Image (cartoon, rainbow, N blue to C red):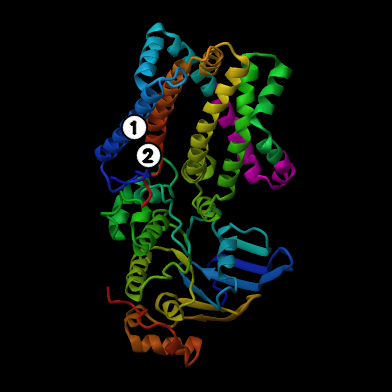
Amino acid sequence: MAPLNAALKIGIERKAYPAAGRRGPVQVLKDIELSVSVGSFVAITGPSGCGKTTLLNIVAGLDRDFEGSVVFAASEPHLAYVFQTPRLLPWRTVSENVALALPPGDPRLARVQELLVRVGLGEAAGAHPERLSLGMRRRAALARAFILDPDFLLMDEPFVSLDEAAAQDLRALLRKLCSGRPVTVLFVTHNTMEAVALATRVVRLSAAPASIVTDVAVALPEELRTSPDAMAAEHRRIFGSNAWADAPQGAGRDGS
Amino acid sequence: MAQGDTVLDSDAGPLVRLGWTLVSIAALAAIWHLAATALQSRVLPGPIAVTSTFLYELKAGALGWHLGATLARVAASFVLAVVIGTAIGLTLGRVRWIDRFFDSWLILFLNLPVLVVIILCYVWFGLTEVAAITAVAINKIPNFAVTMREGTRSLSKDLAEMAEVYRFGRWRTLRHVILPQLAPFFMAAVRSGLALVWKIVLVVELLGRSNGVGYQLNVAFQIFDVSLILAYAIAFILVVQTIEVGILQPLEVRAGRWRR
């Protein structure tokens, strides 16, 4: 796939972690070529430990030690990252955590409370993160990402270790927050059904050193994402026949 | 939020705990009184005699003068130790090769007997105030450096990455991400540090100063005035406890408010 209006071009030739102790250098990524168009929602799946997080860290600019390039179309893209753990500052309240994502004096500071209400944390704005459930902390992490009005949203298994109902609520919330915005999402998940439920494109990586195995558009119109049958069929098309049975059920849209 | 009482009984109210403290101190005083009455010895004056000595010294102004001198030395050497020790600890925690190089120096200074440092300072710099304060600070700097090094090493990489992605910048990262993580280590170092500095200052005064509680204890020792020794000891305990309860504990409670 080579979209004309690419917002982001990833061309990683090689990424290896240096030798540590007796272990030699470990190569994690190999020949990853991805061109991501504006507003697309790319799900990245692959076996655990294959280098999905490393890929996101490279795109985020946290890891600069690799061979290749990551080029954004915009000169200064607004980038937000929702990590695998919420990574909130435990000594700051929920609303302070969200506000800190903005530069001091930013006019959007006035919208923090409104956004917290939207993500269902209106009451918890003044609470410290350790007093909240994991689901609520994940909501706070989402709010921190969306207060920036990001052009790019990187998400690293943002709904992992939640029960399925809570994960489903958060997926619906994510869809709601993304709708009506030109946000481009890179979404790492090992839950293949979550990938089908959310993404417009699914990229599968091999085991380490990871390279792209398949890169498929999800041919599922919005209205069919509520239909379990249509989703199952699409999942079968992308991931093969028996994968559906292994995946946890109910990752589809909950009709909100 | 009645939490934050990291002290013992979190189930008992503050009044109950105060009651226990008073009863236990009264019991100790009673035992002391009985022992002193039974022995009738010049070297074990009872609580009443010691209290009257205490009040006499207080009225005469000697107690205030010597305590003030000691407090000033504690403050000066403590601030010195905190600033230098923290700077060294942060550097060692961040820069690998400096840490490797200076680690053995640190171990050497940690194990250097307190008395050796004091004597050497007096020998090299003379019986001066500077020598006294330097000696105390040198004794405390290694402990501070080690604790702050541990704190710096345990800084969360996850939060540092978060701050980088969300463009906190240097100052906001320091204020909102790094300092709150170092605060518990700092408080631990301050508390154990103060406990140690108090004691070292007395030795320094005993060996080479002409005022302060340590000096006064030495005078009392030479004339075998046990009552005076105990009066100063009690004054000393009162001041240390006031600082502990009045300043350090509230600070710690405030710093730990966010904890579950």
Magenta residues span B76-105
Gap in angstroms between the C-alphas marked 2 and 1: 29 Å
Q: Nearer the viewer, mark 2 or mark 1?
A: 1
Classed neighbour count for the residue bearing mark 2: other residues with Cα under 10 Å, few (<14), some (14–19), many (≥20): few
Classed neighbour count for the residue bearing mark 1: other residues with Cα under 10 Å, few (<14), some (14–19), many (≥20): few
Q: Can you tell which quarter of the image residue A199 is in?
A: bottom left
Of residue A99 and residue B89, the one placed in the foreground of this image is B89
Amino acid beneath label 2: Arg
Q: Residue A170 at x, y = what percent? A: 35, 68
Check the residue under mark 2 and report the chain it is in.
B
When the figure is inspected, residue B107 is found, relative to residue A112, above or below; the finding is above
Q: Residue A225 at x, y = what percent? A: 35, 80
Q: Can you tell which quarter of the image residue B244 is in?
A: top left
Secondary structure at numbered mark 2: helix
Secondary structure at numbered mark 1: helix
Which residue has dot 1 on it? Answer: B25
Which residue has dot 2 on it? Answer: B254
